[in-house]
Amino acid sequence: MNMTSHKGELYYCEICGAEVKVEKGGDGSLTCCGQAMVIKET
């Protein structure tokens, strides 16, 4: 899945719980533990 991330968004891994905050947006997929990371609702 290809997506666009935007500065300030927070993503997490449903398997290990790792979290990533986007500092510079761009195209592509954020993955962890072999699957796409999920955007965390604020």
Image (cartoon, rainbow, N blue to C red):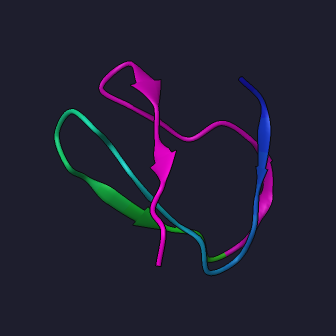
The tally of labels here is 0
* Quadrant showing the N terminus: top right
The question of residue 4 being in magenta is answered with: no
Q: Is residue 11 left or right of residue 22?
A: left
Residue found at the very far front of the displayed protein: 41
Say which residue appears at 32% left-offset and 43% top-offset.
13
Residue 8 at what x, y percent from top left? 61, 81
Answer left or right for 1 relative to 14. right
Asked if residue 4 is positioned above or below residue 35 in the image, the reply reads: below
Over which residues does the magenta segment extend?
24-42
* Percent position of residue 32, x then y: 37, 34
Q: Residue at x 48, y 45 (%)?
A: 38
The residue depicted at 21 percent of the width and 33 percent of the height is: 15
10 on left or right of 5: left
Drawn side of residue 31 relative to residue 6, left or right = left
Q: x%, y% of residue 6?
A: 75, 68
> Where is 11 relative to 9, above or below?
above
